[in-house]
Amino acid sequence: MYRDNTLIPSEAIRLLALGILADGDRRYAELASEVRRFTSHVVGPSLDLVASPLELLKVEGLIEPLPGANRDADGAADGDESSADDEILRVTDSGRDELTRLMTSNVRAPVNDINKLIIALKMRFLHLLTAADQLLQLEILIEMGERELARLVNLRGLHAEDPGHLVAWLDHDISETRARLDWLGGLREGIAAG
């Protein structure tokens, strides 16, 4: 994590893998495929976003193979390398603690590709947190959005008389940011009423 308690890219990947497994056990190959697919859909192919090996999560005790899940027809454990892709994984108690730690991190403004990924991950796995932690995360996202909105409004004021299309572009960004804030506020109210 960075000093301001925001996630570094490898921690975003860690959050994604742990969140997927917290939602349900997966085969190793399925987990790797879901991680790749989700990140590429949110941020596109990125050389900057290097996934930490899923094996590291096993070494750290954050995920583990399901006992007895990888047996052949005779009940013997498969030992060949192809069975590693078929290995069914689950998140451990330590992995759930790590998931909560990662989910309750801050988010940086302005929103860039990595922050979009982190916000998407928070939205995907928000239901895994307690209601109090969900509300705290929504407050963090709302505060970040408010800072972003203030920055955009200030920038628009500085260039209001400039020729070109910058003001129209900023109006578009301001509108999107306000809509995002309204949506987050509605989600917060729904969870608080919960």
Image: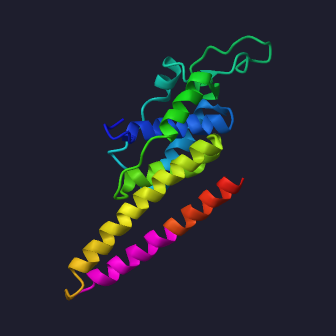
Q: Is residue 42 above or below residue 77?
A: below
Q: Position of residue 72 (x, y in %)?
A: 75, 18
The image's colour scheme reads rainbow
Residue at horizontal 26%, vertical 73%?
A: 155
> Residue 94 occupies which quadrant of the picture?
top right
Q: Nearer the viewer, residue 27 or 24?
A: 24
Q: Is residue 142 above or below residue 161?
A: above
Residue at horizontal 27%, vertical 73%?
A: 154
Q: Nearer the viewer, residue 74 or 7?
A: 7
Does residue 125 show up? no
Q: Nearer the viewer, residue 155 or 75?
A: 155
Q: Which corner quadrant holds the N terminus?
A: top left
Q: Position of residue 89 (x, y in %)?
A: 63, 27
Q: Position of residue 165 (x, y in %)?
A: 27, 84
Q: Is residue 136 above or below residue 87?
A: below
Q: Main secondary structure of the magenta part?
A: helix
Residue pushed farthest right? Answer: 74
In the image, is 155 to the left or to the right of 94?
Answer: left
Q: Position of residue 180 (x, y in %)?
A: 50, 66
Residue at horizontal 46%, vertical 39%?
A: 13
Assess whether residue 113 is covered by the magenta stretch: no
Does residue 164 show up? yes
- What residue span does the magenta drawing correspond to? 164-180
Q: Nearer the viewer, residue 143 or 152?
A: 143
In the image, is 24 to the left or to the right of 32?
Answer: right
Assess whether residue 165 is covered by the magenta stretch: yes
In the image, is 75 to the left or to the right of 85?
Answer: right
